[in-house]
Amino acid sequence: MGRLIVISNRVGQPDDTRGASVGGLAMALGAALREYNGIWFGWSGRTVETFTGQLSVQRGQGATIATVDLEEQDRDEYYNGYANRTLWPLFHYRIDLSAYERSFNEGYARVNARFAQTVLPLLEPDDFIWVHDYHLIPLARELRRRGVKNRIGFFLHIPWPARRLFATLPLHRELVEAVFDYDLVGFQSHDSLSAFEDYVRGEAEGEIDSGGIAQAFGRRVRLGVFPIGLDADAFMAAARGEAAAAWRERMRVSLAGRRMIIGVDRLDYSKGLEERFLAYEEYLANTPEALEQVFLLQIATPSRDEVEAYQEIRARLDAVTGRINGAFATPDWVPIRYVNRTYRRDELAGIYSMAAIGLVTPLRDGMNLVAKEYVAAQPPEDPGVLILSRFAGAAEQMEEALIVNPFSREEVSDAIEAGLAMPRDERVRRWESLIEGVRRHDVAAWRDAFVEALLAAPCSPADRLATAEP
C-alpha cells in the first residue's frame, strides 16, 4: 500500500499527543499519518508578497509536514473571504451572514489551483490522497487537470446544507460538479449525506444506487458516512496525567461545594453560545434554589477575528454575560464564568471531569468532538451528564445523552434541571453506553473505514480526464 497524503487548509503537529485544546483534526489525522507513514500538506498560515510555491518540509516521527506560504490577497479572498464568509455560514444554515462576492470565488479557485500545483511533486503513483474540508472542495478537479490518477478521497468536517439553502450559492452547480472528481466523499452524519443526495437528484438530475454510488455530470463518486472519533485511549490517558490532576484539584477548590456546568467551544455563531446563555438564564430564573449553588464555566476560544461576524458575536456574548451576571451575581458567586483563551486537551480533561453537566448545544455542527471528550474524561464511579444538541452530528451516535433543541430555551433549561437531579445509577448507565460508543467508534475506526472505502471505490481516472478541461 502506498503512502497517505493528507491535504488540508492548515496542518497540525501529529507528534503532539496533547494536541489542540478544542479542535480534533490534528489529533485525528496524526494517528492516520503515523499509521501510513504519510505526508500532511497545507498552508503555513504565513503570507508573502509574491506567491512562489516554495515548500517547507519538516520530518517528524512517522510523518512529514509540508507547507506553502500564500499571498495576502489569497488569505483575504480564499480564507477570510470564500471559505469563512461564504461557505462556512452557508453550510451552517446562516445564509443571512453569507457574503457572495466574485473576488472571493476567484481567490478560492486560485488557491485550490496553487495547492494542486505545489503538492504535485510530492506525489508518487501508489499514494492515496485524503483531502479535508470545505476550503478545498475543488482540489481533486485541479489535480485531475494536472494528470493525477491516484485515488482521491474527500471528507467534509462540517455539515452539508439542505438543497434549497445550497442553491442560494452562486455557481453552486459548478462546485458540486467538482465533487465528482473524487473517488470517495465522506460526511459526518446521515443528515448531511441525505442533503447532498437530495441536491444530486433534484438539482443535478443525477442518481444514487443502493450501494451509495452517485452518478451525475457524466461521472461517478462513492458517498458514505464516516463519523469522526477521538483518539480515545490517548485522551483517557491524558485525563489520568499530571496536568489533568492539577486542574482537577484547582477546580475542586474553586467549586467551593457548588456544581459546575461546562461548555467548551470555538467562539463561533454556529456554536449557539448566546442561545445557551439565555437558556441558562431561564434555568436560573425558574430555579431560585439553584442560585449560588451552580455556575456555568464557558471556555470560548477566539477565532477568525478578522471576520466581522466574529467580532459581532464576541461583542454580543460579552454583553449577555455581563447582563446575566449583573442580574444574578452575589458578592461571592457569579453564575457565568466566561473565559476567552485556549487550554490544552490534557488540561481540559481535568476540568471536564469536575463538571456535573457537559453543555454541548451548537445550532449546527458536523460532529463536535467536545461531546466525546467530555464523556471520556468522566469518572466512571460518578459521571456527569451530557446535554447535546440534536443538530450536532454526534447526536446520531450519542443517544444516551440528553438530546435537546438548542433553539428552545425552555428545553435546554429543563435538561439542565433534569441533568443536575439525575440519580447516580442512571448517570452511570448512560455514561457506560456513551463511553462504549466513544471507544468503539474512535479515530482508528474512522480512519480505517474511510481508507478501506477509498481503496474499494470505483476508480476510472481515464473517464475523468476525458471530461476534464485542459
Image: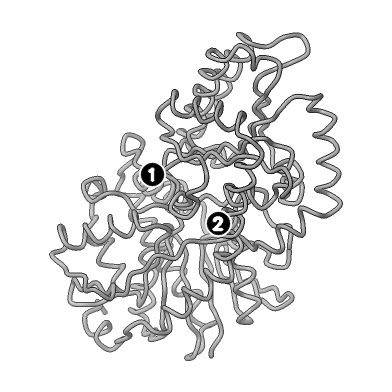
x%, y% of residue 148?
39, 84
- The quadrant the C terminus occupies is bottom left
In the image, residue 158 sits, relative to residue 248, either above or below, namely: below
> Which one is in front, 43 or 288?
288
> Which one is in front, 272 or 390?
390
Is 9 left, or right, of 339 in this rendering? left
| Residue at the spot of label 1 | 92
Mark 1 residue type: His
Label 2 sits on a secondary structure element that is loop
| Residue at the spot of label 2 | 49
Extreme residue in the left direction: 205
Q: Quadrant of residue 214?
A: bottom left
Query: At x 85% / y 38%, what residue is drawn?
Result: 249
Query: At x 83% / y 54%, what residue is drawn?
Result: 241
Rate crowding at label 1 as few (under 14), some (14 to 19) or many (20 or more) other CA atoms within 10 Å. Answer: many
x%, y% of residue 46?
60, 56
In the image, residue 13 sits, relative to residue 281, either above or below, namely: below
Colour approach in the figure: one colour
Rate crowding at label 2 as few (under 14), some (14 to 19) or many (20 or more) other CA atoms within 10 Å. Answer: few
Query: At x 50% / y 24%, what residue is drawn?
Result: 279
x%, y% of residue 356?
67, 35
Label 1 or label 2, whichever lies nearer to me, is 1
> Which one is in front, 403 or 276?
403
Q: Quadrant of residue 456?
A: bottom left
Is 51 left, or right, of 101 in this rendering? right
x%, y% of residue 329?
68, 11
Is 201 left, or right, of 290 in this rendering? left
Mark 2 residue type: Glu
Determine whether label 1 and label 2 are within 8 Å by CB: no
